[in-house]
Structures are given as C-alpha cells and as structure tokens.
Amino acid sequence: MKHWLWLAAFVAACALVPLFGNNYALRLATIMCLYAGLALSWNFIGGMAGYPSFATAAFFGLGAYVSAVLQAKGVPFVAAWAAAGFAATIFAALIGMAILHLKGHYFAIASLAVVEVLREVVNTAEGLTGGGMGINIPLQGMSADVQARLFFFVMLTMTVVLLAATIIVSTSKLGFGLRCISQNEDAADILGINTTFYKVAAFSLSAFGVAIIGAIYASWVQYIEPPDVFDILYSVKPLVMVLLGGLGTIFGPVIGAVLYLALEELVWRNFLTVHAAVLGALIVALVLFLPNGVGAMFRQWRKRPAVQS
Amino acid sequence: MTALLELKNVSRRFGGLVAVKDVSVSIKQGEIVGLLGPNGAGKTTLVNVVTGVHPATGGSVLFEGRDITHMPAFRIARSGLARTFQIVQPFPKMTVVENVAAAALFAGGAGGMQEAFELARRQLEFAGLADAADQIASTLTLAKRKRLEFAKGLAMNPKLLMLDEVNAGLNSAEVEDAMRLIRRIADSGVTILIIEHIMKVVLSVSDRLLVLHHGELIADGLPAEVTNDRRVIEAYLGKRYAEKTER
C-alpha cells in the first residue's frame, strides 16, 4: 500500500512539470522518465534476478527500429510502439533461452554481443532499415510545443506502468522466485523453482519495457540511425542508475535515474570537454562508497536516531 | 509393498571418472535408510543423481513407479523428493522464515504467499527455529543453519527426504537433537534417507543400511548384518584389519 502512495506522489510531482516548467524543463523531465523507465526495466533481470545484462541497448535499438520500420509502412504510432514491445519480448525469450544458463561475466559478455549483432544486422539490412543512412519518422500535424508535451506524458505513462509492474512483481511469486535465484540459483532449483522460466520471464519483461521506450524515443527524436539507438551507453547507464539507487529495490531505479540525470546535467554544463571522464570518476566513486545505493544510506540514516535515543 | 524410490543399474560418470557404478536399490515407503561410505565413495553424487542435479549417465531412477531419470531438478523437487545439502545452501540475504516460505511456495504446494509464510512458521516451530524466524539466514550459527535445512526440506512437503550429512560439524549434543528431530519427521510418515560417513550416528536411527565404496553398492541389509560384513569392514578399516578379525 505504501508503495502505491509513493507511486502516486511521483506521478503528481512529474505532472506538475508541464504546468510550471519551460520547454527545457519539459525535455529534462522526459529524459528523466526515459532513464527511469530503462532503469526499472533493467532492474527485473539485473536487480531482481541478479543477471548483469548488457542487452538493454539491443532491446532499445530493436524497439526503435521495429516501430520506425512499421511507421514507415504506414502503421499508426501507438500500434507500432506496442508491436515493438511484443517483438522484443519474443526476441528476448528466444535469446534468453540460449544465454541465460551462463552466469556472471559470461552472461554479461554474451548479452553485450547481442547489441553488436543487432547493430550489424540493422546496418546491413538497408532495404528495410535504411542501413547507415538511418530512418526518418516524421510526425505531422503537431506543433513543437504539443509534441513536447505529448512525448513527456507518453514517457511518464510508460514509467508509471513499469513502476506499477515492479511493485506487483516484487510482492508476487515471480519476484520472490527471482530473489531466490539471485541469491542461490542451485538451491532455488532444488526447491522447485523453474529457474529457466523465471529468468526468461524477467529478461522478457525487461526487454518489453526497454523496447517500448526505445520506440517512443524514436518517434520523439524523429530520426534514428544504428550508432544512436544501439549505443552501448543505453546498456551501461541503466545499470549505473540501479546501482546508485539500490539493486533489486522498487524505487531505487527511479531515485538512481533522477540522481544520474542531475549529475549528468551538472557535469556536462561545467566540464564540457572532459565531462565523460568526470562522470565516469564520479560513478566509480559512488559505486565504491555506496555499494548498496543511496536508498540503503537513507534507511541507515533513518534508523540511527532511533538507536541513539 | 511397492518401492517408493527405485534405482536400476544407476551409473554416473564425469569424463573418465565413474563416481557411481551400477547401483540398484529400492527404498520402501516409511523406511529410514542409512547410506554409508567412506569419504569420496559417491554418496553425495548418488543424491545428486536422484534429485536431478547431475542426471544418471546409465540406468534409471523410478519414484513412485515414475521414471524421473532425466526430469529437471525443479520438477523432481515438486513431485515430493526433497534434500538437504551437506554444505548448507540458504538464501543468505533473506530471513529464516522467507527461506522456508520459498520451499513451501515452490515445492510444498502452498496456494499463495500468505499460506506459504503460515506453513513456514509452522515448520520453524517444529524444527525449533521459531525464535530465529526473522533473523537474516547468513547470521545463523552452523547448528541452526542445519536446522534451517531441515525446515526447508520439510516445507517442501516431501514423501522422501534425503539428509546429506546433516550432522557434519555439529557437537554431540547437537547431533542428538538432530537425531531426535529425524525420528519425529519419520513418525510423521516421511521416508528418510540419511547420508553419513560416521557409522555411529546412522546405526542408532536406521532400519536398513546401504554402503557405498568406490561408487559401488557393497552392502544392503539390516544394521547388524552390514556392520559385520567383511567388505564393509575392509572398506572402512582396511583389508589387513578385515583379515585379522576373521582369523
């Protein structure tokens, strides 16, 4: 119940942005929702099941391209986004059955390879995807202001859906099973958990969220090319956000996304030439000194006065 | 009476090493069977074969007349075959009651999360761990972790419970407690297979003993018969000792 109240508070806070903020604030809020959605999606496989997936960029690009190609063929955008989500879910289920028996670093590398393979496939299939030339997704008949608002609300809706899914999963049998798998997979297996099914479910759920966000992103920016949407940063950023906010927690990914975006904006503004290096150093420091995320730090900080008094 | 568990010419090989060789044995409903053997005899491998962790490379395993040789481990667990691990395997970051609830939920047939936690609390009461229910599993002492393994095994609502060296690392008072617990589990109608390499422990509770040596079953019978079996004495104490006692 408490979780749902926080969810409502989050929605209320976000919904205020278009009322009071300018277009810059709106753009930032849209990116924040995009980041939070990616982080929440990654959390299913990376946080709950404990499988360090780097395939996020693959699902992001796949979603973007499926939706873009469908829209180029005349499918309306909402239908194209949904199709992108389902295509990625099926793709992830098939890939997952092949690579989810790998553990730790081996799984990470295998999932990373998925990104590279998909990028090459999209690059080569010029007839369908435009190859290296990219693909245009014009959205006609809407002013820039209306579009900015539309995509903000669409992105927010997606984040809310994923947050609700996180709450439901983490309090259900699926979430419980995933936590068992992340802590001791052999024991989970012998306790009657169908580990393959659970892992594939988490991976597919993760892909579903990421792909729809990728599809929305493509419509938002109106032009995509392989190096843009298959950018490995889409794999790394959600992982860092979840580590920042708290692995496997419900609101951790959202908190992490907000913090990450704030850091990214501040650093980018103040260290224009070396911002990537500064951001990298900051992330390393945060992960080293806050291994359980800022959420855990707050919980400890809240506990302390009770012990002292 | 038909056998609950039946092994027919079961073998398991790891590359060139034959860890279990041509073992045939059957365990009846309601028995307490001790599985003995020196270190490295293949006892744990045999349990792994039965539970589907390392499926047999030869022969077949029947549980309640059904062939489970190549069934995935999770399905075997759900069908009523539970085990504890020699090296305890808790979910370290979960509480004790969550650990047991997982067993009840995924293998014990609990209808939902709430029912699983109620069942788990009852099993913890039975295993004498009720006080530690909300403790994080990794903070338990070894004796309590072994009891947690018991409770997990029981929460799976098993027909056959295999206890793999539940006494290793316990002191004699703790061993006695564990034995009492095993008796009570047996009284509730669960068939039990105790795996041990210390003979004394098993002799006191078992109806029947099996002895493995170099992966082969060298004895199967009443405790009194088995402990006087020449091949068993040889395996445990050496050939020269066996010859000496015979003279």
Image: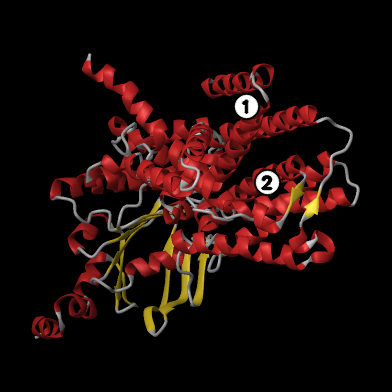
Q: In the image, what residue type sits under mark 1?
A: Ala
Location of the N terminus of chain A by quadrant is top right
The answer to whether A218 appears left or right of B160 in the picture is: right
Q: Distance between the residues labelled 1 and 2?
A: 28 Å
**Residues at badges 1 and 2 in contact (C-beta under 8 Å)?**
no
Q: How many labels sit on residues? A: 2
Q: In the image, what residue type sits under mark 2?
A: Phe
| Numbered label attached to residue A25 | 1
Asked if residue B167 is positioned above or below residue A140 in the image, the reply reads below
Which residue appears farthest toward the top when viewing the image?
A309
- Label 2: how many Cα within 10 Å (few below 14, some 14–19, many 20+): many
Residue B65 visible, this angle: no
Residue at image position (35%, 31%) is A297
Q: Where does label 2 land, which residue?
A: A208
Where in the figure is residue A62, as x and y percent of width and height? 71, 54
User: Tag 2 or tag 1, which sits nearer the N-term?
Assistant: 1
> Numbered disc 1: what chain?
A
